[in-house]
Amino acid sequence: MAEPEPVSGQSISLQAARLTNEINQMLNQREVEPDRLLPLILECAAEKYKTCRIRESDHVTLRLLTLFQEHTEDKELDRELFEQTVKQVILQSDGSLRLRLVNDKVV
């Protein structure tokens, strides 16, 4: 549960692809018009950002993985590790416990 989710191949929108093509065409011209080029670059960056798959939970998951790897030899519960990694303790109706980690995964 502390492993990051696999990232599938990044895809960009048709609009981002069109803008990228338009930017490349403008850059291949003898004279580049910065007043026309800069807005296209910013619009293209915004389009690409919309499809960005980086999530905060990925960073948190990697931090969890590092913390757990540092404690693989522990024989007793490390209270500090528990408090750093567990967001919520969930008591099930059958009496068992589940833990919601700080990356929102439940174990």
Image (spheres, helix red, strand yellow):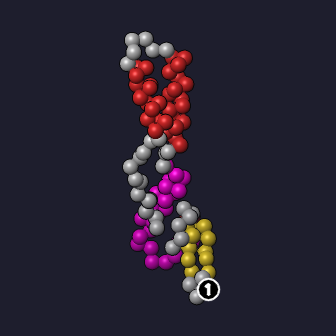
- Amino acid carrying label 1: it is Ser
- Foreground pick, 35 / 21: 21
Furthest-top residue in this view? 31
Q: Which residue lies at the image location 49% right of the left edge and 59% below the top edge?
A: 61
Q: Which residue lies at the image location 47% right of the left edge and 30% below the top edge?
A: 19
Q: Is residue 102 left or right of 62 when viewed as pictured? A: right
Q: Position of residue 78 (x, y in %)?
A: 53, 72
Residue 34 higher or lower than 49, as above or below: above
The question of residue 20 being in magenta is answered with no
- Foreground pick, 43 / 81: 43
Q: Which residue lies at the image location 49% right of the left edge and 78% below the top edge?
A: 76
- Foreground pick, 64 / 12: 12
Residue picked out by circle 1: 93
Q: Dot 1: what SS? A: loop
Q: Which residue lies at the image location 52% right of the left edge and 37% below the top edge?
A: 47
Furthest-bottom residue in this view? 94
The segment highlighted magenta reads 54-80
Image-quadrant location for residue 104? bottom right
Q: Position of residue 9 (x, y in %)?
A: 38, 49
* Residue 8 visible from this viewpoint: yes
Residue 3 higher or lower than 7, as above or below: below
Residue 6 higher or lower than 94, as above or below: above
Q: Main secondary structure of the magenta part?
A: helix
Q: Position of residue 64 (x, y in %)?
A: 49, 62
- Foreground pick, 81 / 34: 34
